[in-house]
Image: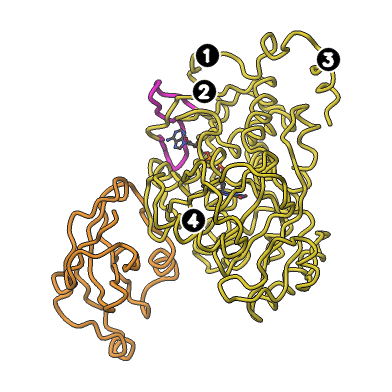
Amino acid sequence: MPFSLLKYGLNKDYPFEKNADLPAPSALKPHYDVVIIGGGGHGIATAYYLAKYHGITNVAVLEKGYLGGGNTARNTAVIRSNYLTSEGVKFYSESVKLFQELSNEFDFNIMYSRRGQLTLAHSDAAVRGFRQRTEVNKHFGGKTELIDPQQIRELVPTLNMNPADQPVLAGLWHMDGATARHDAVAWGYAKGATQRGVELHQLTEVTGVNVEHGKVTSVDTNRGKVSCGCVVQAVAGMSSVVAAMAGIRMPITTYPLQAMVTQPVKPFLDPLVSSPALHCYVQQTGRGELVFGGGSDPYPLYSTRSTMDLKESLLAHAVELFPFMANMRLMRQWGGLTDMTSDYSPIMGLSPVDNYYLDAGWGTWGFKSTPICGKTMAELVATGRVPELIEPFSMARFDSFRQVNEMGATAASH
Amino acid sequence: MKIINCPLNGPRNSSEFVHGGELRQMPDPNNCTDKEWADYVFYSDNQIGVITEWWLHAPSGYWFIAERHTGSDEILRTYDPSEIFTHRVDFAEKVESGQPEEIKA
Ligand SMILES: Cc1cc2nc3c(=O)[nH]c(=O)nc-3n(C[C@H](O)[C@H](O)[C@H](O)COP(=O)(O)OP(=O)(O)OC[C@H]3O[C@@H](n4cnc5c(N)ncnc54)[C@H](O)[C@@H]3O)c2cc1C
């Protein structure tokens, strides 16, 4: 726990009033060394590490809405590293490690809560897949085990072991599985970045990208033109739309992803529980609400509306997993725009335009990678070299048919 | 969009339909470059606007074409593929002859 919390607790003045987290809005400068498009977790984390590790502070983060109002505010905050490929596991494990230290690093509580994640296998094929994931995870230092139905019953006594007539055969028990408060992650990074001199411009939409001789030179915004040394694009669901401004076509399709929460109840569920076969995952927040999520919508769309269809199918499966939930009421529902790639891995690194860097294709699984994305993208910008950790995720992998297939380890669990 | 107007079966609930992806021109797999093939299978414009796409009415196994706005989710028109595909595309034959295929879209 950050000790300053205790100090604030005993202070009779509310300390944040004289010590606001973010500076007041300012005018846009005509030039920045680095322009970051998108003030979600990824964009603002990149700015933070640029300032912190590389001393690069002439940086503007341009956000068309408000800080962290995109998918950063909309995700269900599952943090885990139990992926399938060695490229994936190495990358996400680094992120989990960074997450564990963030509250102390920021001196700002991100409410990191390590609960463990339990993924259920309902078929022999799934058990085999889990076995492989267990071994890959252990190999890279993760804490993951294959557990049997008796152990599952002990971990989650309220779970129906035969949901929708699909008996639970085994579980992938990932002890590093966790959640954190997503807004706090964005705010912690924003506070740290702006204190070091980075400018965050909210309500500032990028409307055009200007490329000369194959190199990006400036961006147009609703508040005027800004010249720049380089650009980092981190706009999640809008990736193809913004990239097209720079003349870049991407292997991405945008789908809505919905989630919802119930009224709060007494704590009964500690681990995060997920069933890929039932396209559903359930977790209980620190406030007692149950959060549900599932797969993306069935067809591409740029809209964050909620649908009855998704609620019906998702809740039917959630109630199969925890039958007593049938009497609970939903409180909120929402959607976000997810930038899906065909192999369920991200697109990070260089683009066909010089000095224009991509952080995209984060689909339904990019909250957990926020710290490591910020760190590796900052290194790329500062050194001009692609860090080894993100080399496998280059957009060019699609041209040489070298996908990093994480579909089975991602689909309904994020 | 909750109701889709199927050219064969009339207006039906959207849950009866399966999305089949954007209609696009397939390059000749025998003669195109890897980059052209990758572009065809992986890349997409993915912009906000009206797109032409395949849909399947699953209960009747009927494929058709829709023009839909990817921002408003409004379907402007649905029609039978014969409006676009005026003659048969024979894949087996094409592999043997290596002839470029004729899909007009
Ligand atoms: C319902 C749901 C559940 C999810 N659950 C999980 C989960 O459990 N675990 C997990 O790891 N991931 C999850 N995700 C995915 C995760 O939320 C995202 O991958 C991640 O937040 C992406 O972060 P980001 O900073 O790249 O994008 P965002 O937070 O979306 O930020 C992008 C920003 O760019 C801005 N922008 C767009 N266009 C422009 C423009 N032209 N000019 C200026 N700014 C622009 C947007 O306003 C937005 O604020 C979930 C997503 C959703 C929708």
Q: Amino acid at mark 2?
A: His
The answer to whether the residue labelled 1 contacts the one labelled 2, judged by CB atoms less than 8 Å apart, is yes
Q: Which numbered disc flags the more N-terminal residue, 2 or 4? A: 2
Query: Are tags 3 and 2 found on a single chain?
Result: yes
Q: Which chain is yellow?
A: A
Residue nearer the viewer, B16 or A150: A150
The answer to whether the residue labelled 3 contacts the one labelled 2, judged by CB atoms less than 8 Å apart, is no
Task: Measure the C-alpha gap from mark 3 to mark 2.
Answer: 34 Å
Which mark, by number, is residue A10?
3
Residue bounds of the magenta highlight: A209-227
Q: In the rendered view, tell whether residue B44 sits above or below residue A386.
A: below
Q: Amino acid at mark 3?
A: Leu
Q: Amino acid at mark 1?
A: Ser
- In this picture the colour scheme is by chain
Residue B32 drawn at (x, y percent): 37, 73
Which mark, by number, is residue A26?
1
> Magenta stretch containing residue A219, yes or no?
yes
Q: Which residue is mark 4?
A: A340
Q: Chain of mark 2?
A: A
